[in-house]
Image (tube, coloured by chain):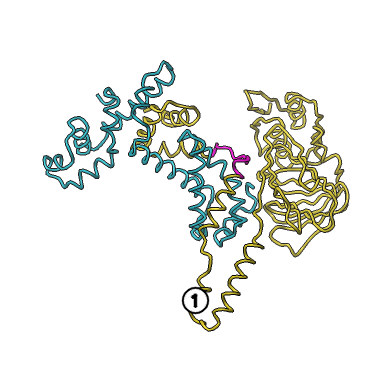
Amino acid sequence: MNEGFITNLIRNFFEKDHFPKTQLLFRYWFRLEDNQDEKDEALQELWEKSPSEVTSSTLEDLARLQKRMYDEQPLFGRAHRLLFRQILKYAAVLVFVAMSSVITYYVTRPSSFQFVEFSVPYGECEKMQLSDGSTVWVNAGSTLIYPIKFSADNRTVYLSGEANFSVTKNPKKPFIVQTKHIDVQVLGTKFNVQAYPDMSYTTATLVEGSVKVNEASNTAKSYILKPDEQLTYSNRKHNISITHVNALKLTSWNKGYLIFQGAPFDEIVTTLERKYNVHINYDAEKYSGGSYYGKFNPDESVEQVLSVLCKLAKNTSYQIHGSTVYMHSR
Amino acid sequence: MINIREEDCVKELSRGDKKSFELLFLHYQPQLVHFICGFIKDSELARDVAQDVFLSIWNNREKLSEIKSFKAYLFKMGKNAVCNFYDHSIVNDKFEAEELSRQGDTDNIEEALFAKELESLIEIAVCQMPAQRRLIYTMSRIEGVNNSEIAERLQLNKRTVENHLTAALADVRKMVKQWPTLFL
C-alpha cells in the first residue's frame, strides 16, 4: 500500500462529516488490527493539530465535572470516623465539632476559579480588557490565561508569548504576570513581557511606574525595574541582566511597528514569522552571533519586509512559495 | 499555558490540587473534545466522553506523579476512549440497521468513493488474517455456523473460537447482512 494512504484516509474521515454507513465502515476498519503503526501515527498527528480554544461550553463542562468530582467525595474523612468510634463518651461534642467543620468547609470552600484562555494566532495582535479594568495587548502567537474573577488578594495571570500590560492601580491587590521562567509583579503601571516558548530568553520591559521581577524558581531574590529598563532572563543559562532601552519603541508592536535594537537574527526571523504568519527557511548558523538594528512600519508588506531582511543579512535573496519563504545567500 | 510550569501543575494535581486540575482542564479539554469529535462525529457525545476521561484522570491522580508528559498521557486516554466507543458502538449496533439501509445508497460520489475505499481495506484486512482465524470467520460469516459447531468441526475449544472471532470483531455477520457485496 502506498505511503501515507492510511494517514490520508484517517485525516479525510476526521475532517469531514460522513454518512452513518461510512462511519460504521470506518469504525470497523479502524478497529481491525492491521496497519496499527500507521493508524497510530495518523492519530498522533490529528491530536497535535487539534486546536485548544476555551469557549463557554468548556467552562460549562468544567463546572459540570467539578460537581461530579465533589459529589463523589466522602462527607467525612477516615480520621473522623475513627475518632467517633474511639471516644464515644465525647460523641455529642465531637458530632458538634464535626458538623461545624463540615459546615465551615462548605461555607469557606474556595469558590471555583474559572479561567479563560485568550490565544492570538500568528499574523495578528489583539487588545483585551481584564475584569479589573487593566488592558492587555496580546501579540501574535501568544496565550494569556486569566481568571474570570480575580481572587481576593492578588491578580494573577499566566502568559506564554508576548503582551503589553497597562495595569489599573490597586495597591491592595498586586498584579502578577507569571511565565515559565519569571514572575513580574506590579501595583499599577505599563510594561511588556515577552516569554515565547521558542525563544532563548524571557524579558520584562518597563514603560511607566515600577515593577518587581523574580525568577519563578527563586521567589526570594527580586529585581526592581525603573522606566526604560529591560530585564532579560536567559532561559538556558538561567542568569539575569538589566539593560537600558527605549521601552516605548520596543512596545510599539501593537501599533504595527516592529523595532529591533541589537537583536539576534533568529529573533527577527521568528518575530516576522509570527507577524506575517509565514515560515522562513534560512541557514541559522550563517547569521548567528550578529546583532541587528531595524524598524518595520505597520503598512509594510511581507515582500517589503523580506527585502529589508535580505539587505540586513547581506548578499541574500528570497523566494516565496505559498506561506513558506526561502532565503538563499548569493 | 503551553510550557508554563506544566510539570508543576501535574505534580500538584497528583497531590490533589484542584486548581491545577482546572488549569490543565482549561488548557487541554477543548483539544480533547475536538479530537474525539473528529472520530465520533457528535459534539455533545464528544463532550461527554471527554468528561469521563477527565474524571478518570482526577480519580487516578496519584498515578500522574509517574508520567513524563501530560499531553502524551491525555492523548493515550483520548485514543482509548475513541477505541472503546467504537467497540461499544459496533457491538451494540448503535447505528440502527434501518437508518443505514435508508441512507445506504448515496449520490454523493466523493462519499461513495470513500466508503468503497474503506470496504476494500476491510477486505484486505480479512484476507490478511491468519488462516485459522479467517476460516472461523468465514464459517461464522458465510455459513452462519454457530460457535460450538465451529469448535466441534475444527476440533477446537469453544473459547478459542470465540477469541478468534472477537479478535476479528465478531459483529461482521451483521455488517455482511447489511451489505451483502462487502466481502464477496
- Can see residue B69? yes
Tell me where residue B142 appears, x and y as whole percent: 20, 30
Task: Please tell me whether residue A1 is drawn above or below residue A157 in the rendered image.
Answer: above
Region in magenta: A48-59
For the residue pair A20 and A319, the one nearer the viewer reads as A20
Picture colour for chain B: cyan
Residue at the front extreme of this rendering: A92
Tell me where residue A325 appears, x and y as whole percent: 65, 27
Q: Is residue A82 left or right of residue A325?
A: left
For the point 59% across and 79% down, the residue is A93
Tell me where residue A274 appears, x and y as whole percent: 69, 35
Q: What subunit carries mark 1? A: A
Q: Is residue B116 left or right of residue A247?
A: left
Q: Amino acid at mark 1?
A: Leu
For the residue pair A202 and B13, the one nearer the viewer reads as B13
Badge 1 element? helix
Q: Is residue A22 magenta?
A: no
Task: Please tell me whether residue A278 is drawn above or below residue A99 in the rendered image.
Answer: above
Q: Which residue is mark 1?
A: A82
Name the image quarter holding the N terminus of chain A: top left
Q: Is residue A24 left or right of residue B137?
A: right
Chain the render paints yellow:
A
